Image (spheres, coloured by chain):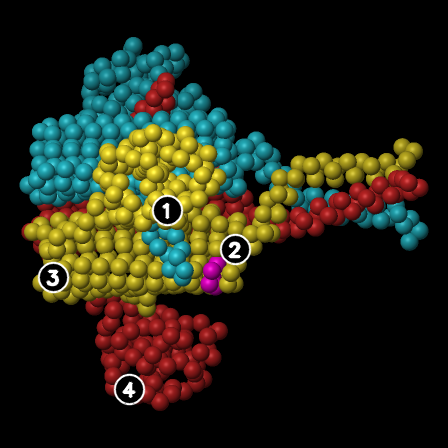
Chain colours: A cyan, B yellow, C red
Amino acid sequence: MSFTLTLTELAKITAASAIEGSRTAPIKAIASLADAGSDDLSFLGNPKYSTAVATSKAGVILVPADYAGKPNAEQVYLRVEKPSYALALICSALEAQLWPQPASGIHASAVIAKTAKIDSTATIGPLCVVGENSTIGAGVVLEAQCFIGANVSIGPRSWFKSGVTIADYCIVGARCRFQSGVVIGSDGFGYEPVGQEIHRIPQIGNVVLEDDVEVGANTTIDRARFSQTTIGRGTKIDNLVQIAHNVRIGKQCLIAAQVGIAGSSTLGDYCVLGGQAGVAGHLTLGDRVQLGAQTGLFQDVATNEFYNGTPAIPIGLERRLVVLSRKLPDLFKKVDSLAASLDSVRRPNS
Amino acid sequence: MSFTLTLTELAKITAASAIEGSRTAPIKAIASLADAGSDDLSFLGNPKYSTAVATSKAGVILVPADYAGKPNAEQVYLRVEKPSYALALICSALEAQLWPQPASGIHASAVIAKTAKIDSTATIGPLCVVGENSTIGAGVVLEAQCFIGANVSIGPRSWFKSGVTIADYCIVGARCRFQSGVVIGSDGFGYEPVGQEIHRIPQIGNVVLEDDVEVGANTTIDRARFSQTTIGRGTKIDNLVQIAHNVRIGKQCLIAAQVGIAGSSTLGDYCVLGGQAGVAGHLTLGDRVQLGAQTGLFQDVATNEFYNGTPAIPIGLERRLVVLSRKLPDLFKKVDSLAASLDSVRRPNS
Amino acid sequence: MSFTLTLTELAKITAASAIEGSRTAPIKAIASLADAGSDDLSFLGNPKYSTAVATSKAGVILVPADYAGKPNAEQVYLRVEKPSYALALICSALEAQLWPQPASGIHASAVIAKTAKIDSTATIGPLCVVGENSTIGAGVVLEAQCFIGANVSIGPRSWFKSGVTIADYCIVGARCRFQSGVVIGSDGFGYEPVGQEIHRIPQIGNVVLEDDVEVGANTTIDRARFSQTTIGRGTKIDNLVQIAHNVRIGKQCLIAAQVGIAGSSTLGDYCVLGGQAGVAGHLTLGDRVQLGAQTGLFQDVATNEFYNGTPAIPIGLERRLVVLSRKLPDLFKKVDSLAASLDSVRRPNS
């Protein structure tokens, strides 16, 4: 993918305090200091890479105001307060170029129920389905092939990549963002044994996503048995995550890829769960709880605690146990040696 | 989501033996004793929550026949034999209201092959595809955007949420149920190294799901290399589960979310696999085998055994090892102390 | 699923050196020696199953040239150099029968942007979407309901099962193969805390898949923050795998189901990752690195190393630690016994 940004545009976007060196060709891509070529922009995001600046072939480099070096020939330094933030500003400008808000309106191939209420500023892409009595807010974008069931409410300016499913009766807040393949409102996994058979327990609740929630590709969030599965305002969920029925997640949490949270567990605000972590059912996690990657949690965790391992324990203890476990070969030898020594003490004449 | 059920309807559905208290407003939702408001129905499902009944604000509470309390003002108790079962009856009645069987027929936007045989009582929703020579049984519902490949057979009264894929040549029994994003019949992952390249092994088998199988959102079940991948009658599979080629799962098993079962492994009947558990390839598990969450199984397991941990071992031993591993810091200290003591015994004069 | 192959066809496909026995009915399926019936073909793929040949009811059996037995009545032996390879030849022939290249052309229900360039020999199935400025190469097959975004390039003869998503700006090589539900080009999971809020970092890179890459059902591969997420030539990825932004995977790797690879990690060529393994972010793995199933890797790994466990260590050490950990009950007892013995030595008269 490519784009074009002139030096003038870059300086303006980044509010650069100084432009050193000169070039006329526009920048066409972004790359790391090591990978960049003469048409690329790069940046010194971390002081530990300072030595890579001088040897970088990047056409333009974002450097901190106090960086000591000077640009090579045909190279430009843009001096900025914080290069990584300046880069984010550039990326935001480029994103708006690459993915502009599409024209509003309903594609002719979409299938819209008669009783659906779709705001005139929303965009409904090709081959989408919107069910009866559903409401689509202002500025919402459904890119293509999305399924919005019946009695669904979608808040303003939420954006759906292709192939997202929001099943019947679910509620989505404002400015939410969904990657492809997301399934919101699948049935909870509720069964009970009845003799030799397993009977399905009806799942008649829904899922409520508050404002600014983002959900990654192919992630699944089940509807509640009754009542609601809820995801708090601003929480971000990565790809292939499973959130079971009746789970309640607080605000501004970060849930990494392939995490699984079993039924009826509750997370506080600002929790961070590492990739592939699992949370058993009916647990309560306080605010700002952290779980390491692949952790398997089977107990409640208090506010501010960081748990790790399977079964999970406080990370300090877990780290210590890992270190000791690696010394087991020595320990076994030492115990054998002690036993032999003791034997010789007890039976000195044998 | 909301609904309306009058007291008379509730009493009839639950076969209540007594109605205590009175109210005229209908019930609009279901909630736990703690969360319920005056328009909600709640229930005493577990005696340990008995004290929550008296303080609950629920408009209607299902209580056991022998529960000692009396309803508050504007509150009603329905006395029933088993409140949790009575609740299930109510949920079933509500589910039938919320998701009635849709009208039969084929939506105009669906793409149906000429040679497909679709029962006149089946419902084919918008933007579905049904391939050549496939058969769709009586009362089957494809909600929307489902893909049924060629030469597929779907048994009567199976229900497909939106976006389900049943690939070519697969066979689905009666009364099966699929959540959105399910993929049945993807190619098995079969490759063999040929020199410096990896060659694909054709996967020409299929998947056979017996009656009453249910499959969760975004779960994948691969077709066999040749012959069949089979899921036995009544087995229930949660979201994001991976079932590889040539796996055979028995009857009435419960497979929790994010489980992975590698190629050619065989499970007996009534097995229960916890979330994120993994089963290596070519293993045999007997009937009623249980695996704990996140277990990694690398060996056969006999009937009735419960394995846990990675690599998995019988849960009794695994629990014991976990307890001992947490005492490692003490053990290391104790051994050091023993060594010092022994040293002083051996060299008393040093 | 069934097919028909005559004895003459089978002998030709497998280049059989001898046909022993006779039958007139064609073969309709393939099965193991134990499962096969009179209409099935089976094979002796592994000498350890030699005794199963004599009792097999298979109508046709592929046996090595030097196999000592003779066919039963109504049974045929085809003597071939390598039965498992001969079987693969048969499966390839059957696959070509079962999944012939479909007729080229664009289905009337597909939605194709005006600026898309679609080769006249490509097949675009029902209800597919192809976005602006995208290029679809010669002989490409999109089975149904696929989404190809804007500015995408698809190399010749790549095959897409139903419901595959290739998002905007991504590049797919020649002869790639995608199972249903794959999502290529979802946003990377990039956020940064700003006060009490979490801000999204725009993800403006893309994904580049080189030639002969294959991707399993419901697997997700995120676009880079900027620059590219790359999958090297010939690499095969199983179902439900998560590959995060900026990951670089080398050539001819095998990634089993439910693996997760976190952001910016780099894998060399010929790596093999077992099911459910996790690789933390910003790591470097050399060529031919292997990870066992469920491994959790948190450090770089040099070429040719095999790591296992969580946190992962070289498999030799990991296996040894597992063995020792199972002896912990004995070790604790032994230490207690030593302490008692030592005590009696130190206080002989007490």
- Considering the whole magenta stretch, tell me its main secondary structure: loop
Q: Residue at x 56, y 52 (%)?
A: B315
- Same chain for the residues at labels 3 and 4, yes or no? no
Farthest residue, direction top: A17
> Label 4 is placed on what type of residue?
Arg
Q: Is residue C268 above or below residue B138?
A: above
- The residue wearing badge 2 is B306
Magenta part of the chain = B285-289
Q: At x 74% / y 39%, what residue is drawn?
A: B335
Question: How far apart are labels 2 and 4 at the CA level?
Answer: 49 Å
Q: In the figure, is residue C332 to the left or right of A249?
A: right
* Label 4 Cα crowd, 10 Å radius (few <14 / some 14-19 / many 20+): some
What secondary structure is marked by label 4?
loop
Residue B120 - label: 3
Q: Amino acid at mark 3?
A: Ser
Which label lies toward us, 2 or 4? 2
Which amino acid is tagged 1? Answer: Val
What SS does tag 1 mark?
strand
Q: What's the residue at 52%, 42% (across, down)?
A: A310
Q: Position of residue B272 (x, y in %)?
A: 44, 55
Compute the Cα span from label 3 to label 2.
Answer: 47 Å
| Quadrant for the N terminus of chain A in the image | top left
Query: What's the CA distance linking mark 1 and mark 4?
Result: 69 Å
Where residue C36 appears, as percent x and y from the top left, is 35, 76
**Is C308 on the left-hand or right-hand side of C165?**
right
Circle 4 chain: C
Label 1 – label 2 distance at C-alpha: 36 Å
- Asked where in the image residue A331 lies, by quadrant, the reply is top right
Please give the label number shown on residue B80: 1
Helix, strand, or loop for circle 2?
Answer: strand
